[in-house]
Image (cartoon, helix red, strand yellow):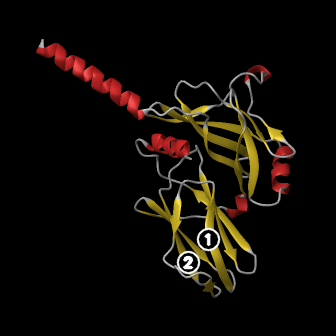
Amino acid sequence: MKKWVIILTAIIAVGTYLAWTKTHLEEPVVMSVQFDEAAKTLAVSYIVEKNDGTYVKEVADDTKSFSPPRSNGDQDRRANNTQVLAKQNGYELREDVIELTDDQLAYFLSLEGRAIPVDISFEDYSPIETILVCLLKDEAVEVTKQDEALVYTFTAPEDITIRSIGHYDSVAMISFEEDDFPLALKKGQSVDILIHDPYKLASHDELLLEIATTNDRSFTQHFSLTEPIPKGYLKQIVNQANAE
């Protein structure tokens, strides 16, 4: 009798744990939308529940739309190259990649600005508004690793006064030792920017950094994020998205 009580208690405990750890998603959580000039791709990474068969149907701005390739050209079928990048707590981090033609590549290079509003259409869901970041190949820079953080050293190419330092479309956090802005730098002087929690949320995930000056000039650089996502991270992102 005691044995059955122990087994029953274990079953109830496991069932309660599984129910408690899973939060229902009303729609996919878009993590990253990046145009990569060097790779000639447009990539979307997103979180869905494990049993959700949805996929990216289209990425669209005001004038054009872009779709992943489909089996036999059938737009009602899942993309040929949908990848599952991670599985945690009943959720999956997936990615769809669109290989761009020369004309599509030229279109993105003609756009003004580095953060473009777009709508991501998924099968069985309403379009989701988000930001697409443009990564230009001549702006890729090297960073150094410091424990689990990354350090980027920006060196002033001329006398400048930095108004702000920020980044687009990433869950990473940045910090710097200097806390007085505007920050005046002479040519050749530098400032270290620390990137905390540089988790990879795509197969090739990059952080786009923008350094803005007081005379409305900006310097944009991008670099690869390096750290694998920790256990339970997808659930954390889902809970944050539901709270919002």
Q: Nearer the viewer, mark 2 or mark 1?
A: 1
- Quick one: 13 or 33, which is closer to the camera? 13
Q: At 53% across and 48% down in the image, what residue appears?
A: 200
Q: Position of residue 220 (x, y in %)?
A: 69, 66
Q: CA distance from mark 2 to mark 1?
A: 11 Å
Q: Is residue 42 above or below residue 77?
A: below
Describe the element under mark 2 as helix, strand or loop.
strand
Q: At 59% across and 50% down in the image, what residue appears?
A: 205
Q: Position of residue 162 (x, y in %)?
A: 65, 79
Q: Amino acid at mark 2?
A: Val
Q: Amino acid at mark 1?
A: Ile
Describe the element under mark 1 as helix, strand or loop.
strand
Residue at which label 2 appears: 191
- Quick one: 93 or 192, which is closer to the camera? 93
Q: Position of residue 113 (x, y in %)?
A: 78, 61
Circles 2 and 1: CB atoms closer than 8 Å: yes
Q: At 76% across and 76% down in the image, what residue appears?
A: 216
Query: Tag 2: Cα neighbours inside 10 Å, few (<14), some, or many (≥20)?
Result: some
Of the numbered discs in the image, which one, if any, rests on residue 165? 1
Query: Tag 1: Cα neighbours inside 10 Å, few (<14), some, or many (≥20)?
Result: some
- Quick one: 241 or 55, which is closer to the camera? 241
Question: With 115 as the anchor, is 25 left or right in this view?
Answer: left
